[in-house]
Image (tube, grey):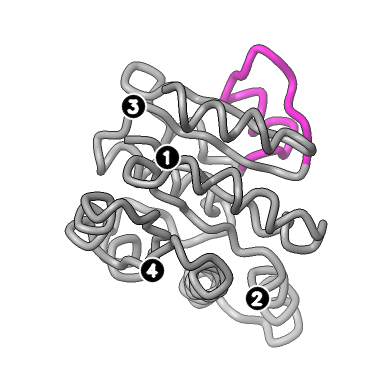
Amino acid sequence: MIVVKLGGSLAKARTLRGWLKALSRGKGRAVVVPGGGAFADTVRAEQERLHLSDRAAHHMAILAMEQYALALADICAEMTACATEREMRDALTRGSIPVWLPATMALADPGIPESWDVTSDSLAAWLARRLGAGRLILVKSAAAPRPLDPAVLAERGLVDRLFPKFFDADKLTLDWVGPGEEDRLADLLTHE
């Protein structure tokens, strides 16, 4: 199994349909974790404007991920919105691409800090561990330095601050797919 975190910023870059086409190569083996994109940006702005607590903003940001997941499932008929591990495994068995609705699982885990130190990147690593996936692919609108080092990625702000804590290098292979690399994503999903 492969977990693919699909950055919300890709929708703003107007490249989303190309990424969804590449993701279709992962039918039956890839689970998509949605970023928060514009939905999460709204939460950040409203937290500042309304002086919301980190706890409230964390919950709202997870719901922002759910909004992006629902949008992805609406755009891509091959995707199925899934809230539980069972739903994801059933979707994979049917040859679909599960896109995770994280609120049910993530908000139930008290080990996930309620702050902006945890974003969809850390949640993707958390889900990959939970599902026993062998690979985590981060699809982002920025390139990353090689070799991929979770601590360096966090230091440079390319992933959230707690990503190195959630990523288990002993059990998970990390790939980074950046701008214009739709074909590379398709290859990773096909030749794993």
Q: Amino acid at mark 2?
A: Val
Tell me how far mark 3 sits from mark 4, CA to CA: 22 Å
**Closest to the observer, 72 or 135:** 72
Query: Is residue 60 left or right of 170 when viewed as pictured?
Result: right
Nearest to N terminus: mark 3 or mark 4: 4
Q: Residues within 10 Å of mark 1 (few under 14, many from 20)?
A: many
- Disc 4 on helix, strand or loop? strand
Q: Amino acid at mark 1?
A: Ala
What is the CA distance from the residue labelled 1 to the residue labelled 4? 19 Å
Marks 1 and 2 sit apart, C-alpha to C-alpha, by 22 Å
The x, y position of residue 59, in whole percent, is 46, 73
Measured as percent of width and height from the top left, residue 23 is found at 53, 46
* Residue stretch in magenta: 142-159
Nearest to the observer: residue 43 or residue 189: 189
Q: First in sequence: mark 1 or mark 2?
A: 2
**Which residue is identified by label 4?**
81
Assign the magenta stretch its main secondary structure: loop
For disc 1, the marked residue is 125
- Residue beneath label 2, please? 43
